[in-house]
Structure formats: C-alpha cells, structure tokens
C-alpha cells in the first residue's frame, strides 16, 4: 500500500512543481499563426463542438501518458505530468499579471478534473508497468479498471466544464 501512495504523491508533486515553476519563471510563447488560427477557430466554435474537441485532445494526451508510463516504468509520464503542470503554470502566471485572482480561479478551476484524470492515467500506467516487469500486484485488475473509468469520466467532464465555463466565461 505504501508504494501505491508514494507513486500517487510523486506524480502529484511533479504536477504541482510544474505549475509552480511555470508561474514563477515561465514565459508565454504564443503558438505559430497556423496553430493560433486553429485555437481561435476552436474558441469561436459552438460550445458543444468545442467540448468534443477538447475531450478528444485530453483523451489522446492521457492515453499517451498511460502508454508511455507502462513502457518506461512511469519515468516518461513523470516528465509529461511535470510539463503539463508547467504549461498550466505559465498560463496562470500570465493571467495573474493581467487579472484578479478570482478571474484566474474561475478560468482554471474547471481544469481540476482534467488534472486529476491526467495524474490517474500516469498512476495506472506505472502500476501496470510494475505489474508487468516486476510481477508486483498492487491493485486487482478490477480496481485498475475502476480507477481508469473514473479517470476517463473526469477527463470527459473536465472538457465540458472547460468549454461551457472557462471558454465561455472568458469571451
């Protein structure tokens, strides 16, 4: 049980460290004009379509994190979790320089489900990796499926919250 707890804490600390470094020292580099146009098209699209696109993107990211975690005993996913936190930290730092704390929280709080889902995917990938490589059974397959299902539900609901709350509020 202690190993499971440590793995969950390590991924959470990596995310929080990424956010902290992003807020303190990150610079906001705007994407290239082509990516910027895609982002603007998404931002200006219908709320439901936007939610579906965000959901697809978030599910792809979490699937990659899960698979890379399985293939690397969690090391690559640890870097990806940190980088994801760093990216959010940069956005928070930029917003804090222009807006109130209330606005920043209103725009970033809907991402909390996405963050938890992302960390859970990294955790499950690492647990599966340990199970495959070292034959350590930290969770039953049933528990792994339940945690994975909860992670997917969080990611899906976060996409709708981001689309209907964050992106609508910011318009």
Image (cartoon, grey):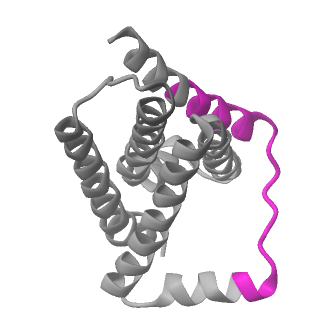
Q: How many marks?
A: 0
* Image spot of residue 63 (x, y percent): 46, 59
Classify residue 28 by image quadrant. Answer: bottom right
Residue sitting at x 19%, y 43% = 146
Name the one closer to the observer, 114 or 146.
146
Residue at 76%, 34% (x, y): give it: 24
Find out whether residue 33 is within the magenta segment: yes
Q: Is residue 105 visible?
A: yes
Based on the picture, tell me whether residue 24 belongs to the magenta stretch.
yes
* Residue range of the region highlighted in magenta in the rendering: 12-35
> Residue 81, position in %: x, y?
59, 42
- Give the residue drawn at x 67%, y 51%: 87
Quadrant of the frame with the N terminus: top left
Tell me which corner region of the image, top left, top right, bottom left or bottom right, holds residue 116. top left
Residue drawn at x 27%, y 60% is 157
**Most foreground residue, 144 or 167:** 144
Q: Is residue 145 above or below residue 134?
A: below
Residue 55 occupies quadrant: bottom left
Residue 144, x across and y down, in percent: 26, 40
């Amino acid at each position: 049980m202690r190993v499971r707890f440590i793995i969950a804490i390590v991924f959470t600390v990596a995310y929080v460290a990424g956010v902290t470094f992003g807020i303190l020292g990150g610079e906001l580099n705007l994407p290239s004009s082509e990516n910027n146009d895609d982002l603007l098209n998404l931002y200006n699209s219908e709320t439901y379509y936007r939610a579906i696109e965000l959901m697809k993107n978030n599910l792809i990211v979490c699937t990659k994190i899960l698979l890379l975690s399985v293939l690397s005993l969690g090391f690559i996913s640890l870097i990806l979790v940190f980088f994801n936190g760093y990216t959010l930290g940069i956005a928070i730092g930029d917003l804090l320089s222009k807006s109130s704390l209330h606005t920043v929280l209103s725009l970033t709080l809907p991402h909390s489900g996405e963050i938890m889902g992302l960390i859970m995917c990294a955790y499950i990938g690492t647990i599966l990796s340990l199970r495959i490589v070292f034959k350590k059974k930290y969770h039953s397959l049933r528990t792994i499926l339940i945690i994975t299902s909860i992670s997917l539900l969080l990611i899906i609901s976060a996409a709708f919250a981001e689309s209907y709350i964050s992106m609508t509020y910011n318009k």
